[in-house]
Amino acid sequence: MLAAIQGAGRFAGQSSVRTWLVGILKHKIVDSIRKSAREPISEFSGEAGAEDLDAYFETDGHFIDPPEAWEDPERALEERRFFEALERCLASLPKATASAFTLRELIGLDTQEICKELGISASNCWVMLYRARMSLRACLERTWFGERAGGSK
Amino acid sequence: MSIRLTCKEASRLISEGMDRRLSFLERLALRLHVGVCDACTRFSRQLGFLRRALQKMPGPDDPEAR
C-alpha cells in the first residue's frame, strides 16, 4: 500500500487516478495476501483478537482519551495535506489490519468477501476493521485535528 | 449483551454497524447510549467522516485536490 502511495507521486495520469490507484492497491493487497498465505499464523494471530483494544479504555469501559470535538472536519477534505496525514496514519496500521480496512473502505468489499480474501472469520474481520478505525481516528486527532497537532491549519 | 452499554461496547457496535446489520437489541442499546454520551456521539460522527475521507481520497492529478 505504501508503494502505491509513493508511486502516486510519479503518476502522469490519463485515466481516472482513482481507478489507477485502486488498481495498484488491489495488486499490492493481492501480493500481501499471497505472502500471508505462506505464513498465515504469524501474519494474523496478533491482529485477530481484540485484547490490544483494551488500551483505549479504562477498566470500567470509559474512554481513557475521549474523542475531542473536531473543528470543521469537512474543510479538511479540501486540503491536500490532510490526505497526506491520513496516508501516514494508514501506513502505521498493522499489515493485516490495513489490508482488511483498505479492502473495505477503498475497494468497497463487504465483510464476507474480505473474510474469503484474507481467510479469516467474520468476527475477526469486524475486530480488525474496528481496530483500524480506532487507530486512524486517534491518529487523525493526534496529527491533524487535536489541539497539539498545531500548525496544521 | 446488557441493554446498558459501556463506551467500550458502544464504540465496537458503532464500528460493526458500518460492516453488518446490527440486531434490534443492539441498535436499541446503542441509541440509548449514544443519546446520552458525548464521547460516543463524537466517535460515531468521526467514523462516518473517516469513511467519507477514504472515499474522497484523491490521486495526485485530481484537480479537486489542488
Image (cartoon, coloured by chain):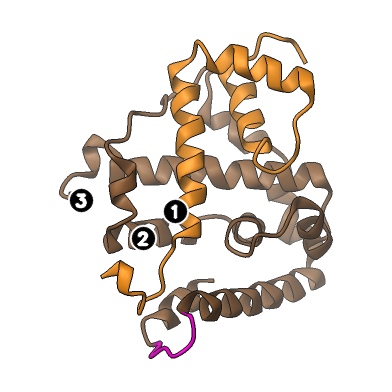
Chain colours: A brown, B orange
* Secondary structure type for disc 1: helix
Residue at 36 percent across and 60 percent down: it is A83
- Circles 2, 1 touching at the beta carbon (< 8 Å): yes
Residue A125 shown in magenta = no
Label 2 in the same subunit as label 1:
no
* Secondary structure type for disc 2: helix
The Cα atoms of the two marked residues, 3 and 1, are separated by 17 Å
Which mark is first along the chain, 3 or 2? 2
Residue matched to label 3: A152
Q: Amino acid at mark 2?
A: Phe
**Residue A29, relative to residue A44: is it above or below?**
below
Disc 1: host chain: B
Q: Amino acid at mark 3?
A: Ser
User: A128 or B19, which lies in front?
Assistant: B19
**Which of label 3 and label 1 is nearer to you?**
1
The Cα atoms of the two marked residues, 2 and 1, are separated by 8 Å
- Mark on residue A83? 2
Q: Amino acid at mark 1?
A: Ala
The Cα atoms of the two marked residues, 2 and 3, are separated by 12 Å
* Secondary structure type for disc 3: loop
**Which of label 2 and label 1 is nearer to you?**
1
Residue extent of the magenta highlight: A11-16
Determine crowd level at label 2: few under 14, some 14-19, many 20+ residues with C-alpha closer than 10 A.
many
- Mark on residue B53? 1
- Circles 3, 1 touching at the beta carbon (< 8 Å): no
Q: Main secondary structure of the magenta part?
A: loop
Label 2 in the same subunit as label 3:
yes
Q: Is residue A120 left or right of residue A11?
A: right
Residue at 52 percent across and 49 percent down: it is B51
Disc 3: host chain: A
In x, y percent, where is residue A149?
Answer: 24, 44
Q: Is residue A11 left or right of residue A148?
A: right
